Amino acid sequence: MSALLQEMSDKALKLNIPLSVQLDLTYRCNERCVHCYLDHDDHGEMTTAEIKHLLDEMADAGVFILTLSGGEIFLRKDFFELLEHARRLMFCVKLKTNAVLIREREAARLRDLGIESVQISIYSHRPEVHDAITLIPGSLKRSVDAIRFLKSQGLKVIIANVLMTQNMQDYPGVRALAAELGVECTLDPTVTPMMDGNRSTVDLGVEQGVLRQVFRDASLVGDVDEFCAIPAQAGESELESTPCSAGHTACYVSPYGEVFPCVQFPLPTGNVRQQRFIDIWRHSDQMNEVRSIRLKDLTTCTSCTHVSNCTRCPGLAFMEGSMRGPSSQDCEKSFARTGIPSANMLAKKRAGANLGQLNLVQIRALPASANPSMASATA
């Protein structure tokens, strides 16, 4: 983060201003990515007029960075009308798209509107792998062609690569492709659960061996020895800090007007179809609960050696059971990075060992909720 943006973020935090908002224009999509966490049916998207009104309210609330995402944003026939309205309001606009529908004409319009950046998901440099993830033959070629169109117009393009079992050895190839195209490249080893709580997509995440390989790749993390150093205990000031920007300087709005702390934090806090955006931001009980949490309030995590440098996502923790609890996916990343088990991992190991010490009679006496294997056997 640049010094200027950090200063803006610090001031926004003090003044309770939603500096950054992701607005999903639609959940409809022309790809069917195997790891996607969205329901692609249209359950009543906001109209053009509703979204324009929301953008006006966001501008009045002090929003500066506006990320337009989906689904696939170019499936909205009013996309450029909405984008033009957003730019008239002087938002710094970032786009997330698969870019399949971007041709030279669309690229030129994006240039003329002065957008900040375009993020495009590329899962592999190999068509057979990328297309097997999107389930659309030819999708890699169309996305890469779009990147070239956008680059030819002088636009900033960022390739986003999500690491999964299907493509876990391909990230060096994606980075080489990005270098060839002259664009940035990011790598995310986290597969997000479905927004309805279904965790089946998490099974697509890579195992510890691959995570360790990623976290020890000098081309990704620079000084590996420093990056993987033994974590220190958090100091008193760190324990008073906020765990994440979600609900503090950033939030997410769905195509149906629902406001959440973050796209990975599906806690409903209000709906802009019934309330003003600023009222939800300032006065929602749920948003203020998220805002009240400090590192010292986290169950299990406060006793963990990783607490001061963990990438813990409160949204993933929420989907796992408690916004104040640990996120197992982030515990696994910390373990892969340092080789030191988290407090959450140690607690689970102890619980498993204690359960293993029970005899069969004791196990049968446990309630089904404490003994999943018995619950499934008797269902």
Image (cartoon, rainbow, N blue to C red):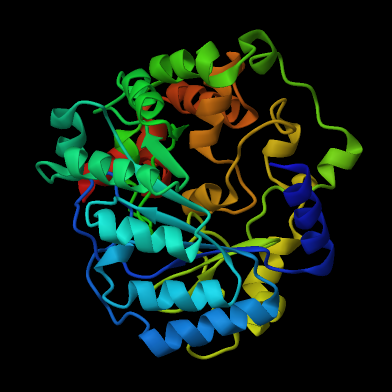
Q: Residue at x 35, y 32 (%)?
A: 205
Residue at 29 percent across and 82 percent down: it is 44
Residue 265 higher or lower than 53, as above or below: above
Instruction: Give the x, y percent position of residue 114.
Output: 51, 61
Q: Nearer the viewer, residue 125 or 225?
A: 125
Residue 297 in the image, given as x and y percentages of width and height: 76, 49
For this orientation, the residue located farthest to the right is 236
Residue under the image location 51 percent in, 87 percent down? 53
Work out which residue is located at the far left of the displayed protein and give it.
137
Give the quadrant of the N terminus.
top right
Residue 32's x, y, as percent?
A: 19, 51
**Horizontal relation, residue 16 to residue 329: left or right:** right
Between 104 and 276, the one nearer to me in the picture: 104
Is residue 271 visible from the viewing direction of this image? no
Q: Nearer the viewer, residue 181 or 67?
A: 181
Instruction: Give the image location of residue 22, x and y in percent.
Output: 51, 63
- Check the image and report above or below for 375 versus 167: below
Numbered label tally: 0
Q: Which residue is drawn at the image coordinates 33% and 64% (left, top)? A: 73
Residue 234 shows in this picture: yes
Q: Is residue 1 above or below residue 257?
A: above
